[in-house]
Image: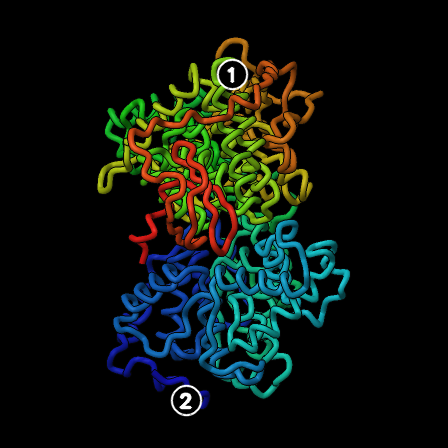
Amino acid sequence: MSDHFDDDPLSNAAPADAFPTPAQRFAYLDGLNPSQREAVEALDGPVLVLAGAGTGKTRVLTTRLAHLLMTRRAAAFQILAVTFTNKAAREMRERVAKLVGIEPEGWWLGTFHALAARILRRHAELVGLKSNFTILDTDDQVRLIKQLLEAENVDSKKWPARQVLGAIERWKDRALTPDRLNDGDGGDVAGGRVVAIYRAYQDRLRTLNACDFGDLLLHNITVFQKHPDVLAEYHRKFRYLLVDEYQDTNVAQYLWLRILSQANKNICCVGDEDQSIYAWRGAEIGNILRFETDFPGAKIVKLEQNYRSTGHILAAASGLIANNQGRLGKTLWTQADGGEPVRVKAVWDGEEEARWVGDEIETLQRKGTSLAQIAVLVRAGFQTREFEERFITLGLPYKVLGGPRFYERQEIRDAMAYFRVVNSPDDDLAFERIVNLPKRGVGPAAMQTLYTAARARGIPLTEAGWALTETDELKPKLRATLRGLLQDFFRWRSLMETLHHTDLARMVLDESGYTRMWQEDKTPEAPGRLENLKELVTAMAEFENLPGFLEHVALVMENAEAAGVDQVTVMTLHGAKGLEFDRVFLPGWEEGVFPNQRALDETGIAGLEEERRLAYVGLTRARKRAYVSHAANRRLYGNWVSALPSRFVDELPKDDIETEAAPGLFSGSGGGAGTFRDTAGGFGGGFGGGGGFQFRGSTRQAPAPKTITLDQGAYAVAPRPRPNAPFAKGERVFHQKFGYGTVVAVEQDKLEIDFEMSGTKKVMDSFVVAADKAG
């Protein structure tokens, strides 16, 4: 492979006899429609290909690359082709090789990060690095930020390292280096010192000869801007640039591409502004909307002929997205027949919605539709729970793409562990999981002490913990913390008979500090985890008591996902981009759920338009039919809420939908609706509007928690009788932590010992041995 900048353009191209004759040479163009062919043959100057969903974008990309090679406009190493995933790069490489008949050598084809890393290794010394620099993963970055927070005396509990890192990453996405920021640009993050921490972070990375993924592009841009001779080399090298998914680029990626295309201006960007759904991770839709301004004289080619969906699906999707202002405009069409209209179903509540979807899927299966060609696409991860449980009840195989099943998610397993210990104090596995979650200072050494005490007596960890709170094996502060936690579990357990189990669940999650832990977590995943916890409490309301719910979940977990079988796909709309299915179910089209209330609250009109693009993506995943559903009522966190249909339902063209509603159910939105807010105090009250449902009428509140006063003496654990006391008063013993001493008092399994070096301590007898057996 050659990377020399002065190579002859054709030196790495295929030999002359490897090319077809002129009459045959461009046969691969014959299968293209006029717009696709125009996009492939427009080789010179800036070109924007607006590729609507299902319009053959991948074919255009690969054919254009092949055409550049076959017309000898450039050798493979003179083309910079950028994709967003390694999988896409691999597929593009294979398809081009098939079209041209050989594997071209010297490709510069890959993701932004892979290509930027390749360039940076050539010029690392220009930004203070060596060519063998290390690229840090997220865990390494977080550890480094933690060290810097400690050095700056910033409270890492108030300002978690991940939140500080998130602020730095957002700046890097916008190509902002520390020298381009003022100290006040970070607001109050890290106590107003986040810019200083960013500066220290970059210095530390150079010392470590390391960079993070954001630096790969950032350092490239710095090299190009400060070293014109280096940039000129790449201008000579790359005659053509090709970019996939341009609507998903961030500011740094945009600048990198603009700089590299300044000389030849032969840049072709392929994208669809109507499928720009990743603003939350830095994507800037303005990059594609401004293309003609950024590249004067640019040619715009619209791919509008769809090869995936029926006429009704395309008309419904086009009618919906036409309500967005921030778009360049295109209308999808197909030569296929109209097919079946989009089915819009109004149901009474979420349970009926899941039942209806399950019944429809069973009907489709009986008629010969493969389950692998059916998908349920939800707006948020918490919505999968009702469908998962319904599919398990029906025995319908399913898989959750893009994440674990509902009851396998970290926060759900944690919450269930709390509930299991409340129900059964002997559940050591559950207690182990949450005894230090959130962090309570119960580290490995303390846990080992608990294990030793429990094994020596054959008792559960909770009972061993009670005993250790009355001795000196653990430090006083830890004893107090452990005693408080065990008292909480005792109190919660005593409320099981008098307090509704959903209220008890909220109380446990609130008072344990687990909910607060996620409310204070600033990672992008935290709001979703809180939504899942709320959905867990909602699920509990369907059962008579806590033990019944725990048994149900155990049975659900037993239904492990089977590999290699025909399965329904359940996933979020964000994860579905790029996929397609014969039949697509789109549940939860209600105000506050979809469009998501948090998106509306945080980003206003821009957020609404992105939500609408997400709905457009959902509809255009369907080949044969799309099914939209909305519920009139939702059980949310113990309350019944009357929900309004999403405004997106009203925006679907009437001629392309088929509506169904049970008698008495409304099928369109009305005025005068307020916004649902969870005002239940601590549990779930902390993520910007919670579920955000629009509702009308009143909510049926769960009963208020009852207050029970407990006798403090009730926390004592009755000692188990011991037939033979192993030690007697006056006996000399040895303790690994406190050394040698003499027993001065015996009380069941507790000894008071006068240690030679540590003074008088209370310890459990399982931690000592006779002095003559020590060593």
Residue 566 lies, in percent from the top left, at 24, 36
Look at the picture and state if 413 lies above or below 238. Answer: above
Looking at the picture, how far across and down is residue 328, in whole percent? 60, 51
**Camera-nearest residue between 160 and 276:** 160
* Element on which disc 2 rests: loop
Q: Residue at x 74, y 60 (%)?
A: 185
Q: Nearer the viewer, residue 52 or 335?
A: 52
Answer with left or right where residue 728 lies relative to residue 368: right
Q: On screen, 245 above or below 586?
A: below
Residue 367 quadrant: top left
Q: Quadrant of the N terminus?
A: bottom left
Q: Relative to the observer, which residue lies in front, 337 or 416? A: 416
Which amino acid type is shown beneath numbered disc 1?
Answer: His
* Circles 1 and 2: CB atoms closer than 8 Å: no
Query: Image quadrant of residue 692?
Result: top right
The 10 Å Cα crowd at callout 2, few under 14, some 14 to 19, many 20 or more, is: some
Furthest residue to the front?
A: 730
**Residue at mark 1:** 500
Q: Is there any visible trace of residue 47 in the rendered image?
A: yes
Can you tell which mark lies on residue 7? 2
Which quadrant is home to the C terminus? bottom left
Q: Residues within 10 Å of mark 1 (few under 14, many from 20)?
A: some
Q: Is residue 307 visible?
A: no
- Amino acid type, callout 2: Asp
Give me the C-alpha separation between circle 1 and circle 2. Answer: 77 Å
Q: In the rendered view, would you say 248 is above or below 121?
A: above
* 311 or 414: nearer the viewer: 414
Label 1 SS: loop
Q: Residue furthest bottom?
A: 6
x and y percent of residue 529 in the render? 51, 39
